[in-house]
Amino acid sequence: IRRYAKEFNMVAKNLSQEAIMAIRKYKWPGNVRQLENRIKKALILSDKPQIQPAALALMPEVLKPLMTLAEAKDDFQKRYINEVLELNNGNRSKTAQDLGVDPRTIFRHLAKQNEK
């Protein structure tokens, strides 16, 4: 940032904690140049003293807060059961058999989803 601030004759700005987190969590499909270009653009366009994630044009899902392990397990379990249900064309008994669980587990899962 300091190098680009000097290059553009600007005051160097700091990255906000959220921006740092977003940079770390973002799956950079390009190379270092992609990150450098985002930093340059944010430095030039940001009118705030700190560079925020929006100035880096990072996707909002990057900024989702971390889940607890229990929440992550629950989320994975829900998505996985739904995926296997779909593969089995909604057949609950076959899904329970494929997952090695009691059919009541699948029924409870579906009942819980219907409550929401």
Image (cartoon, rainbow, N blue to C red):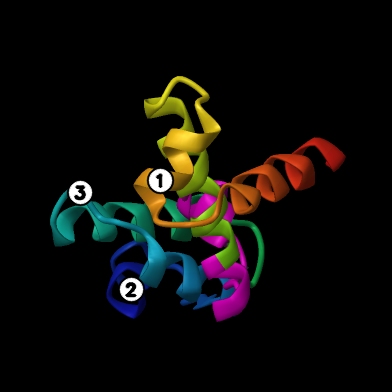
Q: Earlier in the sequence, mark 2 or mark 3?
A: 2
Q: Which mark is residue 97?
A: 1
Q: Which mark is residue 116?
A: none
Q: Is residue 116 left or right of residue 22?
A: right
Image x and y of residue 55, in percent: 54, 53
Q: Which amino acid is tagged 1?
A: Gln
Magenta: predominant secondary structure element?
A: helix
**Crowding near pointer 1: few (<14 within 10 Å), some, many (20+)?**
few
Q: Is residue 6 magenta?
A: no
The secondary structure type at the circle numbered 3 is loop
Q: CA distance from mark 1 to mark 3?
A: 39 Å
| Total labels drawn | 3
**Looking at the rendering, which quadrant does residue 27 occupy?**
bottom left
Q: Which amino acid is tagged 3?
A: Pro
Q: Is residue 44 above or below residue 5?
A: above
Image x and y of residue 97, in percent: 40, 45
**Crowding near pointer 2: few (<14 within 10 Å), some, many (20+)?**
few
Q: Is residue 11 left or right of residue 47?
A: left
Q: Earlier in the sequence, mark 1 or mark 2?
A: 2
**Looking at the rendering, which quadrant does residue 107 occupy?**
top right
- Could you tell me which quadrant the C terminus lies in? top right
Q: Residue at coordinates 56% horizontally, 60% vertically from top-left?
A: 63
Q: Give, as a single range, the part of the protein colored magenta.
A: 53-73
Residue linked to disc 2: 6
Residue 11 visible to the viewer: no
Q: Earlier in the sequence, mark 1 or mark 3?
A: 3
Q: Nearer the viewer, residue 43 or 87?
A: 87
Mark 1 vs 2: CB contact within 8 A: no
Residue linked to disc 3: 29
Q: Residue at coordinates 57% horizontally, 73% vertically from top-left?
A: 66
Q: Which amino acid is tagged 2?
A: Lys
Q: CA distance from mark 2 to mark 3?
A: 28 Å
